[in-house]
Image: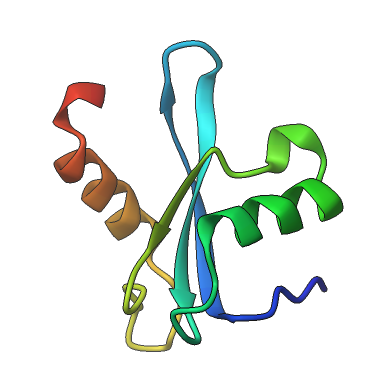
Amino acid sequence: MLDCKGIIECAVIGIPDEHQGETVKIYIVPADNNVTKSDIKEFAIDNLTGYKCPRHIEFVTELPKSNVGKILRQKLREKHMSDNPQTL
C-alpha cells in the first residue's frame, strides 16, 4: 500500500470527460494545510500508471461514510455533479 504524507484519507471516483469518456478525480482529507495539489500530482506520477493519475483534485474536511465506516462514493459523484452541472 502506498502512503502519501499529509493525507488522512482519500477516495477516488470516475467523472465524465469529453475527450476520454471518463477521468479520475480524487477527494482528499489532508492532515494539515501543508499538502498541495502539486504534491499529490507528483506522488501520483511517481507511483501510478498514467491513466490512473487523478486529473482533478479536491480537498475536503471529511468524506461521506455509511454507518459502518465505508466511504460512499455515490455521494461524492452526486457532489461532483451538483458542483459541476455543465457535465450532466
Residue, x 65% and y 50% (percent of image)?
41
User: With 56 as the anchor, is 63 left or right in this view?
Assistant: left
Q: How many marks?
A: 0
Between 47 and 14, which is closer to the camera in this rendering? 47
> How is the rendered protein coloured?
rainbow
Outermost residue on the top side: it is 19
For the N terminus, the quadrant is: bottom right
Between 69 and 45, which is closer to the camera in this rendering? 45
Q: Could one spot residue 88 in this view of the protein?
A: no
Relative image position of residue 78 (x, y in whole percent): 24, 48
Residue, x 77% and y 34% (percent of image)?
50
Residue, x 68% and y 80% (percent of image)?
5
Relative image position of residue 48 (x, y in whole percent): 80, 48
Note whether 36 is above or below 53 in the view shown.
below
Q: Which of the 4 image quadrants contains residue 20?
A: top right
Relative image position of residue 46 (x, y in whole percent): 84, 52
Note whether 3 is above or below 77 in the view shown.
below
User: With 66 as the anchor, is 21 left or right in this view?
Assistant: right
Q: Which of the 4 image quadrants contains residue 15?
A: top left
User: With 40 as the anchor, is 51 left or right in this view?
Assistant: right
Between 71 and 55, which is closer to the camera in this rendering? 55
Relative image position of residue 12 (x, y in whole percent): 53, 54
User: With 2 as the anchor, is 54 left or right in this view?
Assistant: left
Residue, x 59% and y 44% (percent of image)?
54
For the C terminus, the quadrant is: top left
Note whether 5 is above or below 58 in the view shown.
below
Q: Could one spot residue 57 in this view of the protein?
A: yes
